[in-house]
Amino acid sequence: MPSFDPTDTGFLADPYPTLAALREEAPVFYEESLGRWFVTRHADVRACLRDRRLGRNFRHVGTDEEFGAEPLAPRRQAFWDTERWSLLWLEPPEHTRIRKLVAAAFTPRSVESLREPAEQLARELLEPWVERGRMELLHDYAQPYSIAVICRLLGVPTDRGRDLLDWSHAMVKMYEFDTSEEQAEAATQAAADFRGYVLELIAERRREPREDLVTALVEARVDGSRLSEPEIVSTIIVLLNAGHEATVNTLGNGMRALGRRPEQWERLVEGEVPSAAAIEELIRWDPPLQLFERWVLEGGVEVAGHAVPRGEKLSLLFGSANRDPRVFADPDRFDVGRENAAEHIGFGGGIHVCIGAPLARIELEASLRALVEQAPGLELADEPRRNPAFVIWGLEGLELSLATT
Ligand code: HEM
């Protein structure tokens, strides 16, 4: 098996040929230099996501030593405090309790009620840029848009939008393979500042309840008891962070793909393929999250027929699964009308499946539709700049020239 280095600049320039070679060679392999297993094929990634013997965390069933994990550094305590009760960090029964509460606030009806405001906001935000004839998609549109939608759902004022973006960008660096000391320090500081802000917000909603998700979390009761303050803080932070990073990157990656393939963009402009269908191919072809990890919590686990002992770590390669020819015909072809594109693994699966997927779909559809309607003559204005990080997979910027015809 060739060695796999997800931090290599050649790999990051275009990871898909390497992922294809790895996927064809083996459904699962161990990478010595990273001390973990990688799962490459769609069926196996899906099965792992649903396997309850695999967990996002192990600390409820074993020690750092048993699992060969670095102990959480005390000087990073402020960061781990905000993660401690994050849905993404929990396993049952704690996960079940908090997920139930968040799901109660994320009802299909409450999310659907955001569709109209999300569509209007997309049109309004785009308008001045269309008049100027040019924009940098991520900073000028996607980030403020996505922050505004998630803030609206949570009831968080958008005046701190810039801070929310900075905190979240700093915090997600902790999930890369090559996080530097400097980045870890910045993530810890961001977590402390973010926590301070959320505590203020909670205090405000306690004094003056409103019709929003923050108030709902403050007032919620599960089995007669309220959520603790650390639980509320983690939940709000994970919703704000998870709520925009992936959505922004899907739009950036997807518009890069469309900008490079004018014939596919034309199919949207002509109305041959609706935006709601096309966004699934955007997520499949170049997903914003390239991998998620699982720990093996029990003995006797096999992945694609290979025994993987308790205590091992698995990285599930979503981007590779999404290009698996066993599921997607001619998988490297970007086809906005692809019939089974929605079988992608972009939103995960099993108990941690993305709780924000219906909202993400509304945002992506509204944004794509607004771009198609308001700037049908859109073109790439410059070579897209990629962020040199694999796990959170996105662009640094995407310059577009916006023509109305
Ligand atoms: C295109 C956009 C998005 C993508 C591709 C995406 C992807 C994912 C994936 C793959 C997971 C599962 C992680 C795992 O299994 O380990 C996840 C979980 C989650 N997502 Fe999303 N997400 C998106 C947008 C959103 C939005 C808009 C929100 C919030 C409003 C959100 C909130 C969450 C939360 C809270 C979780 C944790 C759920 C749990 O652990 O139970 N996501 N997301």
Image (cartoon, grey):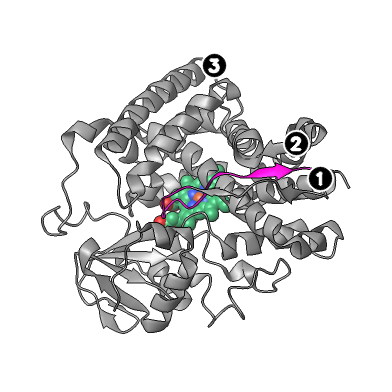
What is the number of the mark on residue 126? Answer: 2
Q: Which residues are magenta?
A: 387-402
* Lateral position of residue 363 relative to residue 180, left or right: right
The quadrant where residue 136 appears: top right
- Left or right placement of residue 203 versus residue 304 in this view: right
Q: Nearer the viewer, residue 223 or 81?
A: 81
Q: Nearer the viewer, residue 152 or 268?
A: 268
Query: In the rendered structure, which disc, 2 or 1, sits on the residue that comes first in sequence?
Result: 2
What's the distance in space between the residues labelled 3 and 2, CA to CA? 34 Å
Q: Earlier in the sequence, mark 3 or mark 2?
A: 2
Q: Residue at x 28, y 54 (%)?
A: 57
Q: Is residue 260 above or below residue 189?
A: below
CB within 8 Å, label 2 to label 1: yes
Q: Quadrant of the N terminus?
A: bottom left
The kind of residue on which mark 3 rests is: Glu
Residue placed under numbered mark 3 in the picture: 208
Structural distance between the alpha carbons of marks 1 and 3: 42 Å
The response on whether ligand 1 sits within 8 Å of label 1 is no
Q: Quadrant of residue 105?
A: top right
Q: Nearer the viewer, residue 65 or 254?
A: 254
Residue 219 visible, this angle: no
Question: Which-is-in-front pick, marks 1 and 3?
Answer: 1
Residue 271: quadrant of the picture: bottom right
Marks 1 and 3 in Cβ contact (< 8 Å): no
Q: Main secondary structure of the magenta part?
A: loop
Please tell me whether mark 3 sits on a helix, a strand or a loop: loop
Is the residue 89 above or below the residue 168 in the image?
below
Please give the label number shown on residue 375. 1
Q: Residues within 10 Å of mark 3 (few under 14, many from 20)?
A: few
